[in-house]
Image (cartoon, helix red, strand yellow):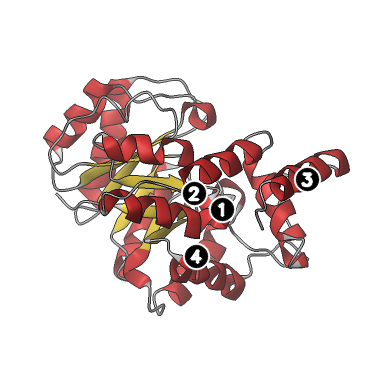
Amino acid sequence: MTQISGIFAAGMSILDENLGLNINKTIEHSENLIAKGCHGVAVFGSTGQAQLISISEKINLLNKLSDSKFKENFLIGTGLNSLTEIINFMKISSSLGFKKFLIMPPAYYKYGDKEVIEFYARIINEVNESKIILYNFEKLCGYKFSLSCVEELVKKFPEQIIGLKDSSYNLYKEINIDGFSILPGSELKLLEGLKGRCTGIITATCNVTAELSRKVYDDFLQNKESSKNGKLCDVRKIFDQFNLISGLHTFLSKKDKIYKNILPPLTLLNKKEEKKLLEDLEKLDFN
């Protein structure tokens, strides 16, 4: 079982003024995060507005991303509901050398563990070489993984089901599977998780906390007191007051106006929210 460990940003998608995906800027943004300390970036997750971006744009980005010197550091989110489209997108990704995927069960419809196991089984039967991180986020898809479901998937597909991103936070303390990667979706869980069985994090706010998060991670591995964890958690709590995508785009747009571009129905923070975000971060001396 391939283990995924370290600090991973849930990468942002950078858009042009016409709201088309700016492939070069998106890749540049992700590569900069890796250079700043992230072990990797998950592209086309929820933070990357994946459900709102066309498949053709995603494929065009993967073609360019396959030339990146950080190619092995990327996880590919599918960000799709259609089983057929997920499989086809994964096959294209695999042909370009991307084997590690972050996959959430489909949104909107109601289902249970049995149906989820069937969903992943069909994917794996078609893309057998894939390495899959399950994406547990009930708030977005309406389904929350159970411990028994994860254990059954790993039992059936030990070579393919390699980890879990836990943004519902019901499993990161409970799973005990040798070699299985457990990555909560918040910096608030980083140090606590590392002291347990977690192997790192995959989070939206690592788009701005890459260096802080990496410092906390490295300090833990070196058995040092984590002097930066308090500030890291405080920054996350400030962003948690708002929609994370809106907050991140608003914050980063202060340095580069291109981050103002965001796909409807998503929006930037309103003026009152923006003022509070910036003032609260300034109090932490965070920039």
**In the depicted structure, whether residue 193 falls above or below residue 14:** above
Earlier residue among tags 2 and 4? 4
How many other residues sit within 10 Å of disc 1, few (<14), some (14-19) or many (≥20)?
A: many
**In the depicted structure, whether residue 217 falls above or below residue 68:** above
Question: What residue is pinned by disc 2?
Answer: 45
Task: Please state the horizontal and vertical placement of residue 119, each as a whole percent of the image.
Answer: 31, 35
Nearest to viewer (mark 2 / mark 4):
4
Task: Please state the horizontal and vertical placement of residue 105, each as a whole percent of the image.
Answer: 40, 35
Instruction: Say which amino acid is labelled 3.
Output: Glu
Question: What residue is pinned by disc 1?
Answer: 48
Q: Which mark is residue 279?
A: 3
Instruction: Say which amino acid is labelled 4.
Output: Leu
The answer to whether marks 2 and 4 mark residues whose Cβ atoms lie closer than 8 Å is no
Q: Secondary structure at mark 3?
A: helix
Instruction: Say which amino acid is labelled 2.
Output: Gly
Q: How far separated are the C-alphas under marks 3 and 4? A: 24 Å
